[in-house]
Amino acid sequence: MTNIGEKVVCLVAYHIFFMLFVWSYWKTIFTLPMNPSKEFHLSYSDKESLEREPRGESQQEVLRRAAKDLPIYTRTMSGAIRYCDRCHLVKPDRCHHCSVCDKCILKMDHHCPWVNNCVGFSNYKFFLLFLAYSLLYCLFIAATDLQYFIKFWTNGLPDTQAKFHIMFLFFAAAMFSVSLSSLFGYHCWLVSKNKSTLEVFRAPIFRHRTDKNGFSLGFSKNLRQVFGDEKKYWLLPVFSSLGDGCSFPTCLVNQDPEQASTPGGLNSNSKSENHLFPAKPLRDSQSHLLTDAPSWPETAAKADKGKVGMSNPALTMENET
């Protein structure tokens, strides 16, 4: 390059992309995955009762008492409460046990060997930004190197060893750009549908039935659930996701009549099925995601709060990852 302005622009852009890439990569690696809070762990007496009683109705009663007031709506394939016998806790919705970390991870997406960490609720935003900035970084390098790569094949470069560095740099940046674009595009689709990688391969099971879109609230609200309400933080690797990872609003297509009553006397079998279901109790930072759509009357919401977890199906203890 001979133009001073072109050199300045390239250097500034390069260092911006590089710093954002390193920052998001660092946050993805060193942000500890969040584990379920104490309310999901069995008490000492419940653990003793669970170990003492034989598998059957006695153990089911222990788990009923432990899970009756918890904000959980997903079940195992057999309809039982999702219980982890390694961590001795009732699994929150979207929580899974990681065999590598040997602990339950909130809203677990996958365990990533490239960052040597579990990608879940606490660092999923950082992981997305890491993919985005690494892709921009590779595209920038490939774009600025392209003209010299062409000169390499047309013998327009000086005959030095540096020209082989240019060729290697372009091939490396281009290949990483292709792989990163497909991975980044896939996770953008996951965010738009409010799904995790695990939920794509095994759809969440609710009381009424399996529902692959049970947690989807629409594109805008799905995006806000990961990136937060304040747009000034969306492009920065700082934590701004909504909620605490233990409870999530759900959009149940066919509502369970034991969990909620339809508003205004509407028939629950009506064809207009897509209603936002306020999965109580929700944390304040997530509950407002439901307010933009038609919501339940206040009396119905209070009644729902009293019914949460009171009509769980027969509970069995299953080891589920």
Image (cartoon, grey):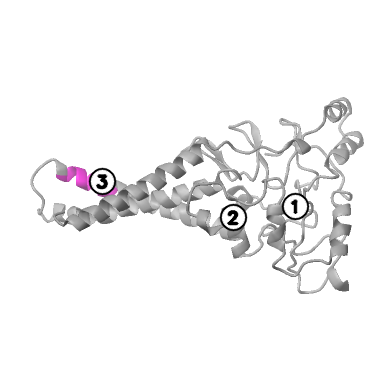
Q: Residue at x 52, y 46 (%)?
A: 238
Instruction: Give the quadrant of residue 217.
Output: bottom right
Q: Which residue is mark 2?
A: 228
Question: Amino acid under label 3?
Answer: Leu
Question: Amino acid under label 2?
Answer: Gly
Classify residue 199 as left or right of residue 238: right
Q: Where residue 205 sits in the image (x, y, percent)?
A: 73, 52
What whole-number distance in Å separates the C-alpha atoms at marks 3 and 1?
49 Å
Task: Find residue 282 and name its label.
Answer: 1
Question: Amino acid under label 1?
Answer: Leu
Residue 220 vertical position relative to residue 244 in the rendered view, above or below: below
Q: Where residue 319 sits in the image (x, y, percent)?
A: 73, 36
Q: Where residue 97 sits in the image (x, y, percent)?
A: 66, 37
Task: Find residue 140 and name its label.
Answer: none
Magenta segment: 163-171
Residue 139 vertical position relative to residue 51 in the rendered view, above or below: below
Residue 74 can be seen, yes or no? yes
Q: Which residue is mark 3?
A: 169
Classify residue 159 as left or right of residue 143: left
For this rendering, which residue is in front, 83 or 265? 265
Q: Residue at x 86, y 48 (%)?
A: 313
Circle 1 SS class: loop
Q: Is residue 280 magenta?
A: no
Circle 3 SS class: helix
